[in-house]
Amino acid sequence: MPQLLKQSRFIYFYLIIGLLSIESCTKDESVVVPVPKVEDVNLAHINFDTNGGVPIVSKDVYVDGVLTVSGQSKSSELIIDAKIRGRGNSTWHYPKKPYKIKLSREESILRLAPEKDWVLLANHIDGTHLINAVGMKIGQLLEMPFTNTIVPVEVTINNEYLGLYMLTEQVEVKTNRVDVGDDGILLNLDTNFDEEWQFKSDTYDLPVTVKYPKTMDADKLTSIKSQFENLEALVANDDFPNNQYLDYIDDVSIAKYLIVYMLTGNEEINHPKSTYIHKTATGKFTMGPIWDFDWGFAYEGSFQHFSSFDRPLFWSSSSRGTQFFSRLMSDPKIELLIKQHWGVFKDNHLSELMNYIDEYDLIIQEAKVRDFNKWQTNDRGVSALKSWIENRVSYMDNFIDSF
């Protein structure tokens, strides 16, 4: 492709990123990858130097240092004091690590809305370096509130080039993140069950961790538990769905959430893991934000992305998440909303999703080569991803027509 066309498509992609932001392999120790010069890379480069070169070895303890973000010109460079630590659950144990960065003040990074907390996703098991971006793009096209923006970047820490990453927002309650107000609630249904304030729900034994409010006590926990279990009890009742359960949870958010997870084959909902739900002080529970597609696209159980396209979203087992969320899907009102929103998405946005995949893949090509030289990560290719999505769309058409 001529260089001028390549550059123009790159600029177009970053314009789209800016507009949106407004709303298992082993490392080959013998491979030495030089740190590329910023002017030689197509992507923005994130460099973090810890004070004294201290290594980052913990998910809990931050290390102080300086963050430098270099974009396409010197004028876009950001240099700021910051802290860094590891993050993730299973992903922290891969050779290529994900990180969380906390800035010393609120700042915009690469046109994203300013905040202090940022995430670098490593995508070690995803050789396409696209899967999480595709999941978030689907959420954006469905106009799901508080869906993250993904920006591809290259990362260097303490003068060691670490490869191709995704910069994205931390899932947290803030004005520019999950904006539920000072008195709102953000919960995560997750079997890791590793927060200071958490509970197992009464009927389905769901592992509910409290991400917000941050200032908690026993009385607040009791109140949050009561609100969630009022909803849960109605879902479990014999008169479901012909009761008032939708007075407690937003029906459109259920439908759109299930569409995203069906289309991406993200079976985390069955455990459940990384399943967020939020509400304002006086509003209903709302599903989302969506998060974590690493084990989607048929990876769950097979440990190979794109291995099959026709697996149901829900399991046949009695897993806690399966029981609760498949019950919600069985409501004819939810089925109708799924059918309606799926039709609109397919007719108006599916081609946009495929174009987004091509654009994203185009601008990360050179970085993917450098990342592969560093980590030897298997890449089945963007064609396998697009073919899988096309087959999954056909599968979903048949499934939704059966409602």
Image: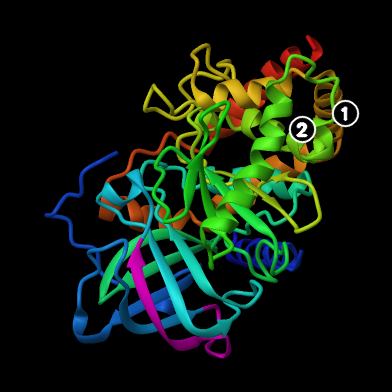
Residue at (39%, 42%) from the top-left corner?
Answer: 192
Q: Quadrant of residue 30?
A: bottom left
Residue at (20%, 80%) from the top-left corner?
Answer: 53
Magenta span of residues: 71-86
Per the image, the residue denoted by label 2 is: 255
> Could you tell me if residue 384 is visible in this image?
no
Helix, strand or loop under label 1: helix
Residues at discs 2 and 1 in contact (Cβ within 8 Å): yes
Residue at (55%, 16%) from the top-left corner?
Answer: 311
For the residue marked with disc 2, what is the amino acid?
Ala
Q: Is residue 100 above or below residue 227?
A: below
Quadrant of the snapshot with the N terminus: bottom right
Return the residue found at the far left: 30
> Could you tell me if residue 250 is visible in this image?
yes
Q: Is residue 222 left or right of residue 82?
A: right
Q: Residue 340, percent across and down?
A: 87, 28
The residue lying toward the viewer, choosing from 358 and 329, is: 329
Taking the magenta stretch, the answer to whether it contains residue 75 is yes
For the residue marked with disc 1, what is the amino acid?
Gln
Callout 2 crowding tier (Cα within 10 Å): few <14, some 14–19, many ≥20: many
Q: Quadrant of residue 110?
A: bottom right
Per the image, the residue denoted by label 1 is: 340
Q: Which mark is residue 310?
A: none
Q: Is residue 360 left or right of residue 282?
A: left
Q: Residue 52, percent across and down?
A: 19, 86
Q: Earlier in the sequence, mark 2 or mark 1?
A: 2
